[in-house]
Amino acid sequence: MQEVEIRFEQDPTLDHIEVVLRSAERNAAIEALIRQLEQVMPQKLTVLDHEGIPSVINEDEIITVSSDGKQVRIITEKGLFTAKQTLQNVEEYLSSHLFLRISRFELINLNRVSKYDFTIAGTLRIEFEGGMEAWASRRYIPKIREKLSGEGGYLC
C-alpha cells in the first residue's frame, strides 16, 4: 500500500470544499480513492422542473438520464426534470462508478437497478425500483457486461 499523507489547509476565501490529490502518477490506488470520495460527496446537478424552474438534485436521486437529441430528460424519485447540457456533458459530470451508459441515448444509475434480464436474443432488459424499465442497446452489451462483472460484482 502506498503511503498517504493527509493535511488540512484552512482558506477563508473558499465557499466550498476543495480536494486535490497529488501523486507521481494516476494509478489504481488514486482511482479507488476518487471513487470513495465520490461516494461520500455525491455530485449535484442543476436541472429544470416541469415548469422550467431551476432546481438542484443529488446524483443519487437519479434513476435514468436520456436524450432524444434535443432535450436531456432526467427521471428521479421526485419526478421528471430536464437539463440544458448535452447527455455527454451530464455523463462526464456524474460519478462514473454510479452511472452506466446503456445506449447512445441513455444512462442508468446502477444503485437504482433491481434486476438485469439478459434475453436469449442477446438483449438486456433493466428493471428499476418501482417497475420502470429500460433496454440496453446490443452495441453496448459487451461494455455493460464488463462493468457489471468487474466493478462491485453486479452480475453473478
Image: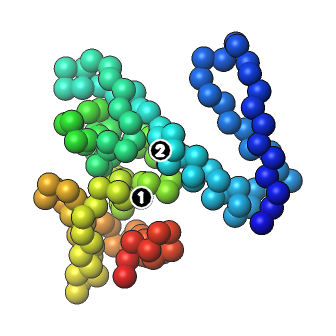
- Residue under pointer 1: 100
Asked if residue 101 is positioned above or below residue 125 in the image, the reply reads above
Q: Quadrant of the N terminus?
A: bottom right
The residue shown at (35%, 57%) is 111
| Residue at point 78%, 37% (across, down) | 7
Q: Where is residue 84 in the image (x, y as percent from the top left)?
A: 38, 29
In the rendering, at what x and y percent does residue 113 appear?
A: 28, 61
**Mark 1 closeness class: few <14, some 14–19, many ≥20 residues within 10 Å:** many
**In the depicted view, which residue is nearer to us: 106 or 154?**
154
Q: Which residue is at a point 70% across and 13% down the rendered structure image?
A: 12
Q: Quadrant of the C terminus?
A: bottom left
At mark 1, the secondary structure is strand
Q: Mark 2 points at which residue?
A: 94
Position of residue 30 relative to residue 149, above or below, is: above
Q: In which quarter of the image is residue 136?
A: bottom left
Mark 2 Cα shell of 10 Å, populated few (<14), some (14-19), many (≥20): many
Q: Residue at x 22, y 42 (%)?
A: 77
Tell which residue pokes out farthest to the bottom in this image.
Answer: 120
Does 134 sit left or right of 4 as displayed?
A: left
Q: Which x, y percent locates residue 150?
A: 51, 74
Q: What element carries label 2?
A: loop
